[in-house]
């Protein structure tokens, strides 16, 4: 797997209503997309910085992965997403090198991307997402 760039950085927030105006001011750019990913029980908001996005994540359920993250760690950086040619192939390649996967196969994420996560205990404590178009 050879990433082409950082596709996005995911940041867990308690409230999009509060965080969107904050980031619009900080980054001097407008949020360009809002999307609810029902399966993950999150609402997302996106900002474009060059070719990298900032993805804000608000949980819609305290028992969801983002809900639990907020409960345990509070707001903050949640994951790094690398753009790859093909998420399924990249997940397989990662597994072959001994990395534990959260997703054995890519699934649909926000913005219609194919995404899959590597387990942070295999990646020096960083939750890494691989995504492809
Ligand atoms: Zn993401």
Image (cartoon, rainbow, N blue to C red):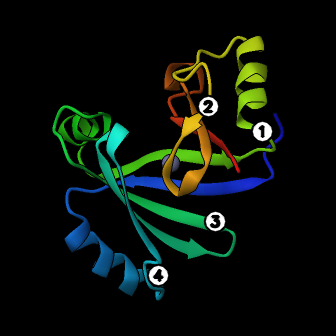
Q: Is mark 2 within 8 Å of ligand 1?
A: no
Q: Is residue 133 left or right of residue 68?
A: right
Closest to the camera, between mark 4 and mark 3, is 3
Q: Position of residue 76 (x, y in %)?
A: 34, 52
Tell me the distance, in whole angstroms, between the alpha carbons under discs 2 and 1: 9 Å
Residue at label 1? 86
1 or 4: tag closer to the N-terminus: 4
Tell me the distance, in whole angstroms, between the alpha carbons under discs 1 and 4: 30 Å
Q: Is residue 87 left or right of residue 71?
A: right
Relative to the observer, which residue lies in front, 65 or 124? 65
Tell me the distance, in whole angstroms, between the alpha carbons under discs 4 and 2: 31 Å
Tell me the distance, in whole angstroms, between the alpha carbons under discs 3 and 2: 21 Å
Against 47, residue 9 (above or below) is above
Q: How dense is the environment of label 1, judged by Cα within 10 Å: few (below 14), some, or many (20 and up)? A: some
Q: Position of residue 91 (x, y in %)?
A: 70, 26
Q: Image point 25% across, 34% down: which residue?
A: 64
Residue at label 2? 106
Which labelled disc corresponds to residue 15?
A: none
Residue 103 falls in image quadrant? top right
Against 17, residue 93 (above or below) is above
Q: Image point 51% across, 45% down: which residue?
A: 109
Instruction: Say if mark 2 contacts mark 1, CB within 8 Å.
Output: no
Residue at label 4? 27
Q: How dense is the environment of label 2, judged by Cα within 10 Å: few (below 14), some, or many (20 and up)? A: many
Q: Position of residue 94 (x, y in %)?
A: 73, 22
Relative to the observer, which residue lies in front, 69 or 63? 63
3 or 2: tag closer to the N-terminus: 3
Residue at label 3? 52
Q: Is mark 1 within 8 Å of ligand 1?
A: no
């Amino acid at each position: 797997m050879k990433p082409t760039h950082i596709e996005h950085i995911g940041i867990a927030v308690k409230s999009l209503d509060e965080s969107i105006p904050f980031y619009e001011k900080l980054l001097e750019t407008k949020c360009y997309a809002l999307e609810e990913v029902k399966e993950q029980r999150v609402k997302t908001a996106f900002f474009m910085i060059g070719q990298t996005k900032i993805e804000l994540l608000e949980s819609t359920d305290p028992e969801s992965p983002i809900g639990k993250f907020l409960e345990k760690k509070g707001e903050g950086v949640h994951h790094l997403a690398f753009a790859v040619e093909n998420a399924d192939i990249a997940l397989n390649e990662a597994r072959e090198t001994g990395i534990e996967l959260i997703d054995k196969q890519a699934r649909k994420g926000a913005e219609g991307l194919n995404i899959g996560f590597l387990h942070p205990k295999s990646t020096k404590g960083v939750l890494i997402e691989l995504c492809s178009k």
